[in-house]
Image (cartoon, coloured by chain):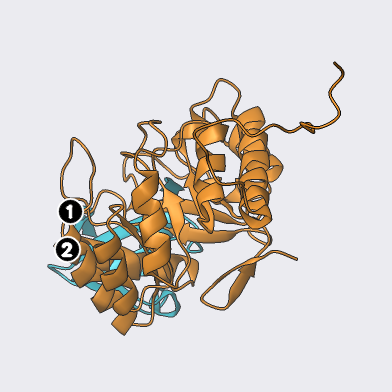
Amino acid sequence: MVRVRLNGVEREFEDGTTVAALLAGLGRAPQWAAVERNRDVLPRAAFPTTELRDGDVLEVVHLVGGG
Amino acid sequence: MDTLTIASREFHSRLFLGTGKYPTFELMREALERSGTEVVTVAVRRVNLDEAGSGKSMLDFIDTKRCLLLPNTAGCYTVEEAVRTARLAREALGTPWVKLEVIGDPKTLFPDNEGLLAAARTLVGEGFVVLPYCLDDPVLCRKLQDAGCAAVMPLAAPIGSGLGIRNPHNLAIILESVTIPVIVDAGVGTASDAAVAMELGCHGLLCNTGVAGAKDPVMMAEAMRDAVAAGRKAFLAGRIPKKRHAAASSPTQGMIE
């Protein structure tokens, strides 16, 4: 298992879980979402190949109404 | 054709609309359509982990062929938060455009000038098209222009206040001070506020709460569209100077005795 901090909450995932799988698990299509991993933006193209690592700090954001 | 150009992109509407606070996405879609807007702002927020995605996004209710999605950095109080949010927005939307906000005070939501300038410089350096929400301060606006911003977005009044154009003279001085477009942002409560801003010569106007919070948001969206167009036309037409005393419209000669 890998332990990560996801949107401020500690979460555990199976070894080898990719960012794409993480988004799918959240019910989010990868379009319109963005992911920051350890303070760096992760390019969308890297979602399917990037595996979560123990200690990762992830921010998963999307777009909402605003002015 | 009177168009607005920002960073080489041409817009036929001078009204920008926000997407917050609408009672429903359907009403928002109708208001955006009837307003004729071509720029809509959106915010960047964490995905809620406890709520499974429905597959429906607010963005499904926006005609992204007609409208540029302009992400904001609303709610950011530090340069770092604003810069990180802008970078995430760029990745999410594939656009380098950002409405930059660095807030300095929770009660007034007034911007932090120093933070705003620092964040603007960083983001311009990274290739962003930066439209900063700022105070109606001509000196600051000139500094933001010098920093490479594509436009300035001075407030008319505090965000969501509906107080209208509190300092038209400052807006007029800003218009004399910068060569980039001036888009009035925040505080526009009703159509006459929009008309006043445009009559001053402002190049565009952003409104969110004034439309979304109206009893009939769709009708207010139309009113704002018409007011922006009317104000712009009056500006281009050139209003008469204000005079203290009367000047008769009818001939003074040829009166019966």
Q: Residue A55: percent from the left, percent from the top?
A: 12, 67
Looking at the rendered structure, the secondary structure element under dot 1 is loop
Residue situated in front as seen by the camera: A42 or B74: B74
**Separation (CA) of disc 2 from disc 1:** 8 Å
Asked if badges 2 and 1 are on one and the same chain, I answer yes
| B141 sits to left or right of B179 | left
Q: Which mark is residue B77?
A: 1
Taking the spot 39% from the left edge, 79% from the top edge, the residue there is A46
Q: Mark 2 lies on which chain?
A: B
Taking the spot 27% from the left edge, 56% from the top edge, the residue there is B137
**Chain B, which colour?**
orange
Taking the spot 30% from the left edge, 78% from the top edge, the residue there is B146
Residue situated in front as seen by the camera: B20 or B36: B36
Q: Are marks 2 and 1 in contact (CB under 8 Å)?
A: yes
| Vertical order, B54 against A63 (above or below) | above
| Vertical order, B124 against B245 (above or below) | below
- The amino acid pointed to by label 1 is Tyr
Number of marks drawn? 2
- The amino acid pointed to by label 2 is Gly
| A45 sits to left or right of B44 | right
Q: Is residue A51 visible?
A: no
Residue A62's quadrant in the figure?
bottom left
Indicate which label's residue lies in the foreground, 2 or 1: 2
Looking at the rendered structure, the secondary structure element under dot 2 is helix
Mark 2 lies on residue? B115
Q: Residue B70: percent from the left, percent from the top?
A: 48, 60
Q: Which chain carries label 1?
A: B
Residue B158's quadrant in the figure?
top left
| A49 sits to left or right of A53 | right
Instruction: List the single residue furthest toward the front.
Output: B257
Give the chain ID for the cyan colour: A
Please identify the quadrant where the N terminus of chain B is shown: bottom right
